[in-house]
Image (cartoon, rainbow, N blue to C red):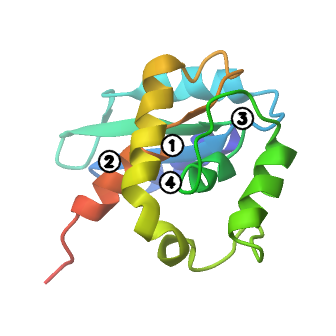
Amino acid sequence: MQIVEYALDTFKGNPEFEQVYAVFDRDDHTTYHDAIKRAEAHESKLKNRDKEKVRFEAVASVPNFEVWFLMHFQDVTAWIHRDQVLHQLKIHIPAYAKGLLGMFEKTKANLLAANARAATQRRINNRLPGDAIYTDVHKLVEILLSLKPAP
């Protein structure tokens, strides 16, 4: 919930944005469901300084954010505890730790496979109730990759 609130507060403090994304994972967060609902309540309801509707979206991962990285290397189809996700990820990236810099470089060769795996799980599972493998990160990565650098 803190991430959704931070994203909302950041936008309200500087309503220049066209799109706002709150990226978070399920882990054992007791406010996960509330965060999803709060983000959904703001979809297409915010307006920027130009009075244009702003996309506000929760980008969730279940059980944790690292499931997205793991999908670059293997299928993840059945429930797996977040500690096991980290263990499996370290098989592929032994130096992995939360916040490790250069993860895009370490995983980009397998981006298409990860996108396909994430899209498959998204078709099978929902982000609520948050008890099945799920990630929206692939959608955000596609958006980021489509952005053109400023001249």
Point out the residue furthest to the top here: 129
Which mark is nearer the camera, 2 or 4? 2
Q: Can you say which quadrant of the picture contains the C terminus?
A: bottom left
> Rounded to the nearest whole Å, what is the CA distance between mark 3 and mark 2?
22 Å
> Rounded to the nearest whole Å, what is the CA distance between mark 1 and mark 2?
11 Å
Residue holding disc 3: 26
Which mark is nearer the camera, 1 or 2? 2
Badge 1 crowding class, 10 Å Cα cut-off, few under 14, some 14 to 19, many 20 or more, is many
Badge 4 crowding class, 10 Å Cα cut-off, few under 14, some 14 to 19, many 20 or more, is few
Which residue is at 33% across, 60% downward? 144
The amino acid pointed to by label 2 is: Gln
Q: Is mark 3 on a helix, strand or loop?
A: loop
Which mark is nearer the camera, 1 or 3? 3
The amino acid pointed to by label 4 is: Thr
Q: Would residue 19 be found to the left or right of residue 23 on screen?
A: left
Marker disc for residue 19: 2
Marker disc for residue 8: 1
- The x and y percentages for residue 42 are 43, 27
